[in-house]
Image (cartoon, grey):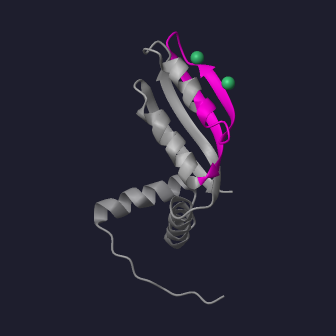
């Protein structure tokens, strides 16, 4: 495999923060770290763009005492029963719940489900992590 060399310019402050992160993560070289970042960005773009099947998780934090929220969350998930494979629910404290939804389906449907859940009043986080299925 042939490799191509590229030159990258950094502001000193950015470079020193970047180097500190590389040390923490145990990278042997800046090149390897930059290649990993490029791969990560490309794989993210492949998932974000176009159609096709994806799978992943939606992590939400919510206050179950917020008006009607528990009921609305169950309702939205039932409307998307084809996409929601499983949920994991943990009671964080007296009011707050952490829930991880395992989801799968057409990218547009999965994104719509995530948007609908994030839009509910009282839902925090709403971190969506997807891979191509
Ligand atoms: Ni149900
Ligand atoms: Ni709970």
Relative image position of residue 131 (x, y in whole percent): 62, 55
Query: Which of 70/88 is in front?
Result: 70
Say which quarter of the image contains residue 7.
bottom left
Q: Quadrant of ligand 2?
A: top right
Relative image position of residue 110 (x, y in whole percent): 57, 47
Relative image position of residue 52 (x, y in whole percent): 62, 61
Q: Is residue 107 magenta?
A: no
Say which quarter of the image contains residue 84.
top right
Q: Is residue 78 magenta?
A: yes
Q: Residue at x 51, y 57 (%)?
A: 23
Query: Image height check: is 126 above or below 2?
Result: above
Main SS category, magenta section: strand
Query: Which of 27/129 is in front?
Result: 129
Q: Which residues are magenta?
A: 77-106
- Look at the image and tell me in which quarter the C terminus lies: bottom right
Q: Residue at x 40, y 25 (%)?
A: 121
Residue at far top of view: 94
């Amino acid at each position: 495999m042939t490799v191509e060399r590229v030159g990258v310019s950094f502001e000193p402050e950015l470079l020193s923060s970047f180097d500190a992160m590389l040390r923490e993560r145990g990278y042997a070289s800046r090149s390897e770290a930059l290649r990993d970042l490029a791969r990560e960005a490309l794989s993210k773009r492949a998932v974000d763009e176009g159609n096709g099947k994806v799978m992943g998780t939606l992590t939400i934090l919510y206050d179950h005492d917020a008006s009607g929220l528990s009921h609305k969350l169950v309702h939205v998930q039932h409307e998307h029963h084809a996409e929601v494979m499983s949920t994991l629910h943990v009671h964080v404290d007296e009011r707050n719940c952490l829930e991880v939804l395992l989801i799968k389906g057409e990218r547009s449907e999965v994104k719509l489900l995530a948007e609908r859940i994030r839009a509910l009043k009282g839902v925090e986080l709403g971190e969506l992590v997807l891979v191509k299925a």
